[in-house]
Image (cartoon, grey):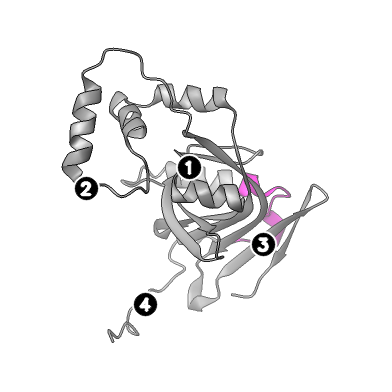
């Protein structure tokens, strides 16, 4: 067994903190604040990358990284193939969890909620904004299916690329929106005494508590 007991990091270098008297009533305001502050740092990685957790028919969890494409008070939007594993899981159980980890600022956000599909019009609008190669990839890829080789995909792309016709969004591809029911904000602090603030919505009203690290 590989011993990783010496792998550790001292937190608190960011000097950020979560003080109760400065916390907003609505957690989306804190999400926007953190996201904008990180975005202004112009880091060389995708800060909108998030872990999406779903469960299968046996209740076994699966994680994968997807890209957040829009967020507002209504929720968090991402896109996928509806027939993929994640799409099948969501159809069976729309309770999912997304999380963001931003080590540059020692922050993590966990969001639980219910996922539903966005409208066809919204999905069409985003699909048409994608690069042509990405549109083609969405059409030829039966996501999560077994394929004989990578060459198989390349040949599919080459065949499709020969057409000059407008590419329409396939019916099995589109957007989802996660409507949050719970947030947890984590801020790394000195001596492992991290800040953890949990927001929960009841009767359409948000409230928060502080959790022990």
* Upstream in sequence: badge 4 or badge 2: 4
Report if residue 46 lies within the magenta region.
Answer: no
Could you say whether the residue bearing mark 1 is in a helix, strand or loop?
loop
Q: Which residue bears the numbered disc 1?
A: 68
Single out the mark in the foreground, 4 or 1.
Answer: 1
Which badge, 1 or 2, comes first in the chain's sequence?
A: 1
Residue 180 coordinates in the image, percent (x, y): 65, 49
**Quarter of the C terminus within the rendering:** bottom right
Residue that mark 3 sits on: 198
Residue annotated with mark 2? 148
Q: CA distance from mark 4 to mark 2?
A: 42 Å
Which quarter shows the N terminus? bottom left
Residue at (55, 65) in percent of width and height: 58
Residue 26 belongs to the span the image colors magenta: yes
Find the residue positioned furthest to the right. Answer: 203
Name the residue at 38% across, 74% down. 9
Q: Are marks 4 and 2 in contact (CB under 8 Å)?
A: no
Residue 9 lies, with reference to residue 112, above or below; the image says below
Observer-nearest of 91 and 119: 91
Q: CA distance from mark 3 to mark 1?
A: 21 Å
Question: Of helix, strand and loop, which one carries label 3?
Answer: strand
Q: CA distance from mark 1 to mark 2?
A: 31 Å
Q: Nearer the viewer, mark 3 or mark 1?
A: 1
Q: Which residues are magenta?
A: 18-30
Could you say which disc has been placed on residue 8 in the image? 4
Point out the tag, 3 or 2, that comes first from the N-terminus.
Answer: 2
Say which element carries label 4.
loop
**In terms of sequence position, does the residue under pointer 3 or pointer 1 come before the other?**
1
How packed mark 4 is, by other alpha carbons closer than 10 Å (few <14, some 14-19, many 20 or more), is: few
- 1 or 2: mark nearer the eye: 2
Task: Please tell me whether mark 3 or mark 4 is closer to you in this view.
Answer: 3
């Amino acid at each position: 067994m590989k011993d990783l007991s010496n792998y550790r990091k001292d937190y608190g270098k960011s000097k950020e903190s979560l003080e109760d008297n400065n916390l907003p009533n609505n957690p989306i305001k804190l999400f926007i604040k953190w996201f904008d502050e990180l975005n202004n740092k112009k880091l060389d990685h995708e800060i909108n990358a998030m872990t999406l957790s779903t469960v299968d028919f046996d209740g076994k969890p699966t994680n994968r990284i997807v890209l957040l494409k829009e967020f507002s008070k209504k929720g968090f939007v991402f896109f996928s193939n509806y027939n993929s594993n994640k799409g099948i899981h969501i159809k069976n159980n729309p309770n999912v969890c997304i999380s963001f980890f931003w080590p540059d600022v020692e922050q993590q956000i966990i969001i639980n909620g219910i996922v539903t599909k966005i409208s066809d019009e919204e999905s069409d609008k985003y699909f048409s904004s994608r690069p042509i190669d990405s549109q083609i990839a969405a059409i030829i890829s039966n996501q999560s299916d077994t394929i004989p080789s990578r060459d198989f995909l390349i040949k599919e792309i080459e065949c499709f690329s020969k057409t000059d016709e407008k590419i329409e969004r396939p019916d099995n591809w589109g957007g989802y929106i996660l409507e949050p029911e719970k947030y947890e904000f984590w801020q790394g602090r000195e001596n492992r005494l991290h800040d953890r603030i949990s927001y929960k919505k009841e009767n359409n009203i948000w409230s928060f508590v502080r959790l022990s690290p």
